[in-house]
Image (cartoon, rainbow, N blue to C red):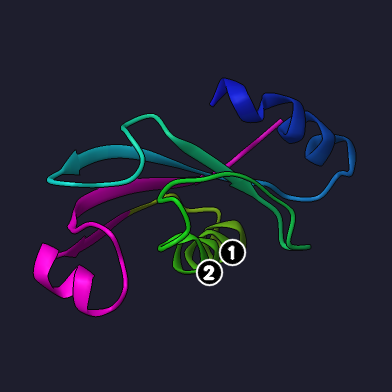
Amino acid sequence: MREILAEIQQMRRSHEPVALATVVKTSGSVPRPVGASMAMTPGGRIAGSVSGGCLEAAVYEEAMKVLESGTPRLLHYGISDEMAWSVGLSCGGEVDIFVEPMTW
């Protein structure tokens, strides 16, 4: 998360709500390790990555629900290596991502 702290500070200064998604568990082949983070706002600002691009849109949608409700969520995504190749992804595996609203 250190790599996105400066961008989170900029988001904070804009007084826009910020959701933080963090990879908390992985299994198999995944593009980002445990601890990888992504911060995002309803206005579409995004900093960081939790999957190297293949899950970011889905995580963003869930993060906006978290901001609306104020309730954190644990998300789980998984795909087999065989299925990953068939849809153009380079890896399969499973990843759990914790999404929470950031409070100041």
Report the side of 2 relative to 7 (left or right): left
In which quadrant of the rendered view does residue 15 lie?
top right
Secondary structure beneath dot 1 equals helix
**Which of these two is toward me, 37 or 84?**
84
Q: Locate the C terminus by quadrant.
A: top right
Name the residue at 81% across, 50% down: 16
Which amino acid type corresponds to the residue marked 1 in the rendered image? Met
**54 in relation to 96, above or below:** below
Q: Is residue 96 magenta?
A: yes
Q: Residue at x 54, y 62 (%)?
A: 60
Q: Which residue is mark 2?
A: 61
- Indicate the position of residue 83 as horizontal and vertical percent values: 15, 74
Q: Position of residue 98 (x, y in %)?
A: 38, 45
- Residue 80 seen in the current view: no
Q: Quadrant of residue 31?
A: top left
Residue 49 makes an appearance in the image = yes
Q: Position of residue 59 (x, y in %)?
A: 46, 61
Residue picked out by circle 1: 64
| 97 is within the stretch colored magenta | yes
Magenta residues (range)? 75-104
Q: Amino acid at mark 2?
A: Glu
